[in-house]
């Protein structure tokens, strides 16, 4: 959180396969301290209700810019997906509008992440992972407008997640259990 410096967990209720729901939600929780106690109870601190400015969308990619606190959502099902922004700070008393800020030349985007220092961005679909290096003082949209580097990626049966390591020296992917019951494997990709 750019305001209080605390680590937060953002949980997006943003999936909508048929693009029929007008409103979606994002829950923000304080990240708990991990202990040997396996049971951790958490309550959300904020609940954001939002809608897309151009109508319902299916999305699976939720990213938070650690430099600005802005939330970014990438739609999934268009031939050229859309990047939406919910600007920080959030007024949780009103329905917020996710503003479409650009169109990206990708389809089926299922995951993305911004490194904890805000300098590196990943997006993935089922077949590929793309990487952008963000220059100091540039926005997420400006960075994503440049040609990405296509990284090495071991295609997974239902690979719909990606995240940076804390130090951004590696990223991880994992699949859902596939319809044919292939067990998920956590893959680690170390940056060169």
Image (tube, rainbow, N blue to C red):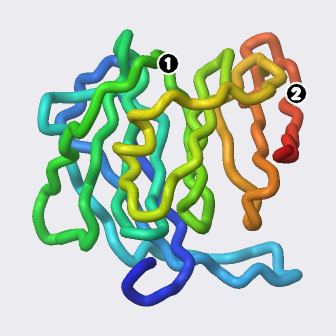
Q: Secondary structure at mark 2?
A: loop
Query: Is residue 121 shown above or below 159?
Result: below
The residue depicted at 23 percent of the width and 55 percent of the height is 49
Please rate how many residues cluster around mark 2, counting C-alpha atoms within 10 Å: few if below 14, some from 14 to 19, many from 20: few
Q: Is residue 98 left or right of residue 116?
A: left
Q: Is residue 57 left or right of residue 184?
A: left
The residue depicted at 82 percent of the width and 73 percent of the height is 38
Query: Is residue 78 shown above or below 35?
Result: above
Residue wearing tag 2? 183
Residue wearing tag 1? 108
Q: For the view shown, which residue lies furthest in the bottom direction? A: 4
Query: Is residue 12 shown above or below 48?
Result: above
Query: Is residue 163 shown above or below 53?
Result: below
**Which residue is more in the foreground, 25 or 68?**
68
Query: Which quarter of the picture shows residue 19?
Result: top left
What percent of the width, then of the height, locates residue 109? 51, 26
Check contact, mark 2 vs mark 1: CB within 8 A.
no
Mark whose residue sits in front, 2 or 1: 1
What percent of the width, then of the height, locates residue 61? 48, 39
* Residue 15 can be seen in this image: no
**Which residue is more in the foreground, 116 or 187?**
116
Q: Is residue 80 left or right of residue 170?
A: left
């Amino acid at each position: 959180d750019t305001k209080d410096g605390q680590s937060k967990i953002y949980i997006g209720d943003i999936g909508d396969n048929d693009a029929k729901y007008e409103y979606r939600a994002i829950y923000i929780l304080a990240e708990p301290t991990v202990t040997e106690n396996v049971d951790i109870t958490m309550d959300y601190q904020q609940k954001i209700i939002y809608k897309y400015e151009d109508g319902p969308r299916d999305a699976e990619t939720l990213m938070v810019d650690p430099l600005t606190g802005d939330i970014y959502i990438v739609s999934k099902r268009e031939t050229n997906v859309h990047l939406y922004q919910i600007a920080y700070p959030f007024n949780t008393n009103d329905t917020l509008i996710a503003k479409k800020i650009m169109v990206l030349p990708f389809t089926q985007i299922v995951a993305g992440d911004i490194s904890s220092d805000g300098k590196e961005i990943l997006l993935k679909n089922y077949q590929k992972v793309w990487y952008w290096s963000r220059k100091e003082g540039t926005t997420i949209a400006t960075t994503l407008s440049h040609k990405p580097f296509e990284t090495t990626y071991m295609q997974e049966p239902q690979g719909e997640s990606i995240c940076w390591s804390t130090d951004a020296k590696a990223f991880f992917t994992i699949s859902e259990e596939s319809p044919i019951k292939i067990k998920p494997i956590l893959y680690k990709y170390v940056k060169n």
